Image (tube, coloured by chain):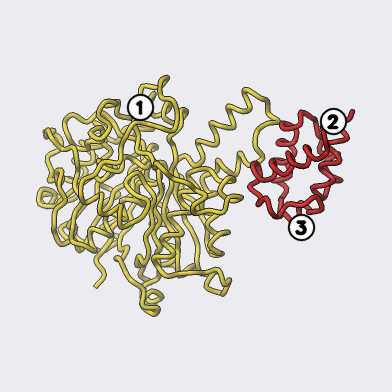
Chain colours: A yellow, B red
Amino acid sequence: MEARRRVVVTGLGTVNPLAGDVDTFWKNLTSGMSGIGRITAFDTDPVPVKIAGEVTDFDPEEFIPRKEARRLDRYAQFFWVATAQALDDAGLDFTDDSEASFRAGVVVGSGIGGIISFQENLDVMRTRGHDRVSPLAITQIIPNMAGGVASIQFHLFGPNNCTVTACAASANAIGDAAEIIRRGDADVMVAGGAEAPICEFAVAGFSQARAVSTRNDEPERASRPFDAGRDGFVMSEGAATLILEERNHALARGAKIYGELVGYGMSADGYHITLPRPGGMGAAKAMEAALRNASLPPEAIDYVNAHGTSTQANDSTETAAIKLVFGEHAYEMPVSSTKSMTGHLLGGAGAIESLACLLAIRDGLIPPTINYEEPDPECDLDYVPNEARESEVRYAMTNSFGFGGHNVSLIFAHHA
Amino acid sequence: MERSVIEQKMVDVLVDELGLERDKIQMGSKFEEDLEVDSLGVVELLMALEDTFGVKIPDEEAEDITTVGEAVDMVQAKLGN
């Protein structure tokens, strides 16, 4: 019987509130920098939430030909840029349209796709009539278009799919892309996620759901996962892309390997549209499924990059879930939330947090949970408070949970 | 409106609204073959021309237009009415 096809990561790319490239992102993430600030994208006077993690000074035409750039929503522009970086980092180029193009594909995750374009076109329709709606409105809004455009631009003619599981979307994208390689349908997959939700409509929507922090006067201190004073997540924007590659394919071309994707687990809370199931059983089932998929005991995990949104409900429930899965090991294992610095990229979160895991594995350096000041009795693990920590990481898990009760866990391994 | 003004505004619309490169646009340029304006781009162009010149261009009338110069002709005729 043919040995199981293994999946390694050979390229990374990102644009996010902390940086427009992977090296600067990692430097800022491990130095505990906050990417959160006052919203500049629109006038926040009418909404109670005035802070977010924005990608400031982003000029799409610096990276994307003007004719293409203006046809894309901001979320798809982010994904284009992150993907170009990742392919370059991996040393892969498919534009000769050889057979390899047909063995390379994309899975992209996005929570709400082109919501800015949705708002803009709705405004136009209400004020100027339906015949002023852009012919590009629909193609800008649909969450799969980032992947469609990537296939056009980078000549990726293999499997192309899109996951839309809210804040678990890009974790699903990475896991599903790995499965496509494992089952032999592709050798290289571009996998990741993108989000650009900083517009009046989306901010109002999340605000009305009472999900986001209103610590407007202290933007950099607003995202404070596991801290007793947390009051909601902080919306942010950006994208992250991983190049997944069949291991022998990567070895044969002498590719740089960041790590191996060894575990992918999913579950559904089956409980409530936004609230996590109390006690954490749903999230625990996803973590257990990922461990089973990786054939690893819980004690093997050296670091968990938590979903850690900074909402009351998530952080206490995720803590309970980690304890259900890891038992005593939960107290010995570093658990951090990089959302304390990046904010919550929603559909892009799983991908950017996978980057954090892979770079932690590469450097033996665990990024902190910043703004951790006052312990919450319900959150009693080692959250790597405020400062990065040197520690060997052989296996790292990242959790992503989405509205609707989607729970996804991924496990990355050191590649010897 | 002077024809030269219409021509100038036409080029501005193609650059600003469709993202085309100014130095590639000539009055004889064919939208589809020379400028790679696709069907979505044609709709954008018609909307932009309607806004810019304050005219109404039904789809049927637009169907016969293949070059930038022909689009200028059409706008000029409408403005003359």
Label 2 crowd (10 A; few <14 / some 14-19 / many >=20): few
Of residues A43 and A162, the one nearer the viewer is A43
What's the chain of the residue with tag 3?
A: B
Q: Mark 1 and mark 2, same subunit?
A: no
Residue A35, x across and y down, in percent? 30, 41
What's the chain of the residue with tag 1?
A: A
Please give the residue where the numbered disc 2 appears in the rendered image. Answer: B79
Of residues B15 and A214, the one nearer the viewer is B15
Determine the CA span between mark 1 and mark 2.
47 Å
N-terminal of the two: label 3 or label 2?
A: 3
Q: Label 3's element?
A: loop
Tags 1 and 2 in contact by the CB under 8 Å rule? no
What's the chain of the residue with tag 2?
A: B
Determine the CA span between mark 3 and mark 2.
28 Å
Please give the residue where the numbered disc 3 appears in the rendered image. Answer: B33
Judge whether A231 appears above or below A73 on screen.
above
Q: Label 1's element?
A: loop
Tally of numbered tags = 3
Picture quadrant where residue B43 is located: top right
Please give the residue where the numbered disc 1 appears in the rendered image. Answer: A50
